[in-house]
Image: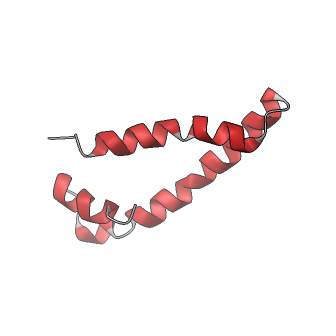
Amino acid sequence: MTYISVSATQVSTVTPELAFYFVAIVNGTSIFGRSLAGVLADVIGNAPPLTCVPCLQLFPKVLSMSWHQQHS
């Protein structure tokens, strides 16, 4: 996540002024993943949140791995 602003300016047409805010945007959107883990644990029942978190982290991992493979 440290290099997200650098790679955003190199990969796409994002200006450096906007790329500076990418880290804050990613941190702000992490609230959905954190709250979704608790809701999913309540729906499933007796599954602890630490069991649900790795399942919910699969999508961001795939997304971050495919970020570098993106070409325009």
Residue 1 is drawn in which quadrant? bottom left
Q: Position of residue 34 (x, y in %)?
A: 65, 50
Instruction: Report the coloring of the rendering.
Output: secondary structure
Q: Which residue in the rendered view is the most extreme toward the left?
A: 72
Q: Identify the residue shown where x is 64% and y is 42%.
A: 53
Q: Position of residue 61 (x, y in %)?
A: 44, 42
Residue 12 visible in the current orientation: no
Query: Is 30 left, or right, of 62 in this rendering?
Result: right
- Image quadrant holding the C terminus, namely top left
Query: Is 45 left, or right, of 59 in this rendering?
Result: right
Q: Position of residue 21 (x, y in %)?
A: 39, 67
Q: Which residue in the rendered view is the most extreme toward the top?
A: 44
Residue 32 visible in the current orientation: yes
Q: Identify the residue shown where x is 29% and y is 44%.
A: 67
> On screen, 48 above or below 31?
above
> On screen, 58 above or below 23?
above
Q: Identify the residue shown where x is 33% and y is 60%.
A: 4
**Viewer-closest of 13 and 62:** 62
Q: How many marks?
A: 0
Residue 17 is drawn in which quadrant? bottom left
Q: Identify the residue shown where x is 59% and y is 40%.
A: 54
Query: Is 9 left, or right, of 32 in this rendering?
Result: left
**Viewer-closest of 46 and 16:** 46
Q: Position of residue 68 (x, y in %)?
A: 25, 46
